[in-house]
Image (cartoon, rainbow, N blue to C red):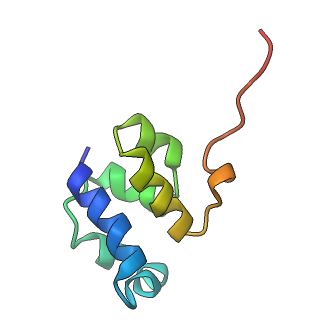
Amino acid sequence: MSVVGLNRLARELEHTPGLLERFREAPQPVLRAYALSEDEKRAVCNTDATWLLAHGMNPVALRNLMVVLGIAHQAMYPPRRTGG
């Protein structure tokens, strides 16, 4: 897990003017500036919070990243199954 790269991406997408718009237009060129694996890039592009969390991304940075990308906090994870 590229923790530093993912945390930096989350922070900069939120705080760097124009970066989020560039990411939305063409994510791959933006992601190349960060030390991320191909799986991490895919998870970010797919807003796959479950995968990122399971692979070690900080939950606070993950929440910030997902919210910046337009995923509501309550929609980040699939509902838990109940029953047996």
Q: Number of labelled discs? A: 0
Residue 59 occupies which quadrant of the picture? top left
The relative height of residue 44 versus residue 15 in the rendered view (above or below) is above
Residue shown at the point (67%, 40%) measured from the top left: 78
Q: Quadrant of the C terminus?
A: top right
Q: Quadrant of the N terminus?
A: top left
Q: Position of residue 66 (x, y in %)?
A: 52, 60
Q: Position of residue 64 (x, y in %)?
A: 47, 61
Residue shown at the point (24%, 59%) measured from the top left: 5
The relative height of residue 51 versus residue 13 in the rendered view (above or below) is above
Q: Position of residue 74 (x, y in %)?
A: 68, 50
The residue most toward the bottom is: 18
Front one among 80 and 38: 80
Residue shown at the point (25%, 57%) measured from the top left: 36
Q: Position of residue 8 (x, y in %)?
A: 27, 65
Front one among 16 and 38: 16
Residue 26 occupies which quadrant of the picture? bottom left
Front one among 63 and 34: 63
The residue most toward the right is: 83
